[in-house]
Image (spheres, rainbow, N blue to C red):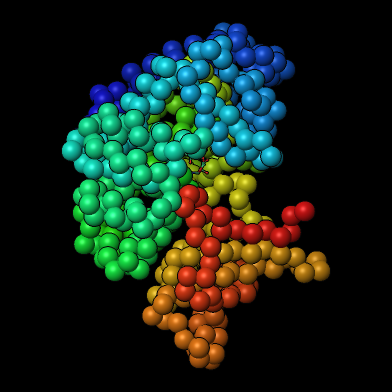
Amino acid sequence: MIWNHEECLPREKLATVQLERLQATLHRVYERVPFYRRSFDEAGVHPRELKTLADLRRFPFTTKADLRDNYPFGLFAVDRKEVVRLHASSGTTGKPIVVGYTRRDLETWTELVARMVTQAGVRAGDVAQIAFSYGLFTGGFGLHYGLERVGATVVPAGGGNSEKQIMLMQDFGTTALVSTPSYALYLAEVAEAMGVDPRSLTVRLGLFGGEPWTEEMRAEIERRWNMRATDNYGLSEVMGPGVAGECEVRGAGQHISEDHFLVEVIDPESGEVLEEPGAKGELVFTSLTKEAFPVVRYRTRDISSLVHEPCACGRTTVRMAKVTGRTDDMLIIRGVNVFPSQIESVLIQIPELGPHYQIIVDRKGYLDELEVVVELLPDCFTDEYAKLEELEKKVAHRLQGVLSLNAKVTLASPNSLERFQGKAKRVIDRRKG
Ligand code: DLL
């Protein structure tokens, strides 16, 4: 089912719409936001010089540091009085990144989330339990209004209260769970500990996003819940959830709402736009319809690639492949680039291990050390030292195969590692500071 015919515009028509909106956005920020005027002037470009979509390359990037430097409202393109909602996400320093929405922005957001949840398979009459926190994080409120718009019965459970989440699922007949993928796995554990088999619940669909996850983790969630787990992507700076989401075609990737967000993939080192179809690089977004907080060439630091072939679902928008990590969470350990998602995909394939783990990076002398602490499944827990040692060796060997790096593996007893109700914080880098 398609929510809005604009998801299926012929590509030439879409390009026309994008160009018009892009020109309007550039003029708008140049006139209204001193930061953009300055940065365009410094780069020697003016909005009127943008004649084609490709001309956007001549315009400068915007980074998280620019957002931080203009904290809190410096990048707003409307008077603060027109802003009816604020959200925030973590910055690189103590202060968060603040984003604002006008009434029309909230309407656009609602429509884009309605699109996204429809393409994932939510229908009127579904009972959608939102286990994202409602607050400055865009997850809770962002999903909420779009789900209501499609006619789902929304259960605004919020983050945390895990046992209660399970009870609500049982009593309300929840059919769709909305959360981070790691919380979905945790909730399965909580249910099991309560003596409830998650597979026996009515949850048939998961809408997961907010953090990177692997295909292996998807398979694990689907197995434990007997549900279809879908991925959706967004970031506060660009809007929140609803930037992109998977359709019902398995493995197709996430359709980007290109009539509202122009996407580029760049080489994170050189900043050059990568033209080859399927090239992997950093996603860069320009908003096309936002009023309060437009962004021009915002560098997401998220690594992905684009799929341009037409999708069997009929939508004409490009799709993004699963995000494999961020340029800034990439760990460099003894000169080797390591993405936490690589480690996860190894761990999750080893049947004795549970889905909870921690990556600790430290420096001993001049040498970086990688330690992976991972929980054993309760059934595989033993106090036979030799068996544990053998398993640790096996895990280390598999990690070596994927990372080309020796890792110290520590098996932890079941339920000993910290659990997260929002985004999991799995990397501890002790080399910093
Ligand atoms: O996490 C928005 C969101 C909420 C998306 C709920 C989906 C569902 P931020 O807190 O600003 O916004 O964090 C954005 O999270 O740049 C990615 O690095 C990461 N991220 C978000 N969704 C995904 C995903 C929300 N599906 C940052 N896969 C982004 C991988 C994701 N990473």
Between 11 and 193, the residue placed more toward the observer is: 193
Location of residue 115 by image quarter: top left
The residue positioned 80% from the left and 66% from the top of the image is 366
417 relative to 72 in the view: left or right: left
Residue 261: give x, y in percent of width and height: 44, 26
351 relative to 303 in the view: left or right: left
Residue 107: give x, y in percent of width and height: 37, 21
The residue positioned 41% from the left and 77% from the top of the image is 378
Check the picture and name the quadrant holding the N terminus: top left
Residue 392 vertical placement versus 331 (above, below): below
Residue 309: give x, y in percent of width and height: 33, 38
Between 102 and 366, the residue placed more toward the observer is: 102
On the question of residue 309 being in view, the answer is no
Between 60 and 208, the residue placed more toward the observer is: 208
- Residue furthest out toward the left: 125
The residue positioned 67% from the left and 58% from the top of the image is 429
Q: How many labels does the image show?
A: 0
Residue 212 vertical placement versus 119 (above, below): below
170 relative to 383 in the view: left or right: left
177 relative to 426 in the view: left or right: left
The residue positioned 50% from the left and 13% from the top of the image is 82
Residue 269: give x, y in percent of width and height: 65, 41
On the question of residue 64 being in view, the answer is yes
